[in-house]
Image (cartoon, grey):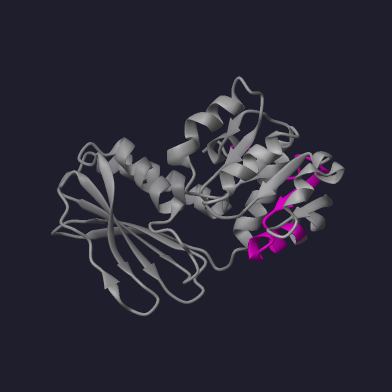
Amino acid sequence: MQTVFNLVEFMKIAIIGYGKMGKMIEQIARDRGHEIVSIIDIDNQQDFDSEAFSSADVAIEFTNPMVAYDNYLKAFKHNVKVVSGSTGWINEHADDVKRMCGEGGQTLFWASNFSIGVAIFSAVNRYLSKIMNGFPQYSVDMEEVHHIHKLDAPSGTAITLAEDIISNLDRKDKWIKGFLINPDGTVIESNAHSENELVINSIRRGEVPGIHSVTYNSEADKITITHDAHSRKGFALGAVLAAEYTAEHSGLLTISDMFKF
């Protein structure tokens, strides 16, 4: 397997969204020898049309589901490649993005999670689901835990993991929301589900960066795989690595393009 480190020694990077992730990405990018030419947040949207932004080799975008797609359009207007970890836009805009990154000649590297550990965990999840397809006595469910500030449930990473399971497990053909435990301890119960549905339960507490677990359970035993992020640093490093990869590639890109597991 080929790892992806230091593909590009120097890049001009624009940052879209200057929250905790944006600040961490800035520091890691500078530490890796890159130049930050533009930082765009909610109060300086006009800078999308600046010469500094247009000079960027890649823009790294971490905002929220409501504005991500518009940010892509603003970047593509200046032919700036985008790396994005924002979720929630796919249902409405996936076809448009595919068209723009195909015949339109634009470039978007999108991932629900940029952590190297999650990329490895995802590969293990896919492999395990292929094995478990031959053992129908095992039920399967998922749980994700995140900080109290996270707006969406289940997480984009959990959905991606679930879709990988569904593609390999004949007895599951869709995922559904399970229970949601809110930061105040209140519980939103899930509706009854059928055997063909993969349940994703969600918990919101404290400042948890992200925990994802997949459990296979039978009368005899239980198998659980878990990825537990210690901080957001792994996500930020992965985003910068993705930007280095994107600088030399084009089209609609994903983690599976960067890491050939």
When asked about the image quadrant of residue 72, the answer is top right
Residue 128 shown left or right of residue 140 in the figure: right
| Residue found at x 53% / y 30% | 96
User: What range of the chain is rendered magenta?
Assistant: 1-26
Is residue 3 visible in the rendered image? The answer is no
Residue toward you, 232 or 44: 44
Whole-percent x and y of residue 215?
A: 29, 57
Q: Residue furthest top?
A: 103
Q: Is residue 232 above or below residue 9?
A: below
Q: Is residue 253 above or below residue 185?
A: above
Whole-percent x and y of residue 187?
A: 28, 72
When asked about the image quadrant of residue 57, the answer is top right
Whole-percent x and y of residue 167?
A: 33, 36
Count of marks placed on residues: 0
Is residue 108 visible in the rendered image? The answer is yes
Residue 158 shown left or right of residue 217 in the figure: right
Q: Residue furthest bottom?
A: 184
In magenta stretch: residue 3: yes
Residue 37 shown left or right of residue 95 in the figure: right
The quadrant the N terminus occupies is: top right
| Residue found at x 48% / y 34% | 94
Residue toward you, 76 or 196: 76
Residue 224 shown left or right of residue 98 in the figure: left
Whole-percent x and y of residue 219?
A: 13, 59
In magenta stretch: residue 241: no
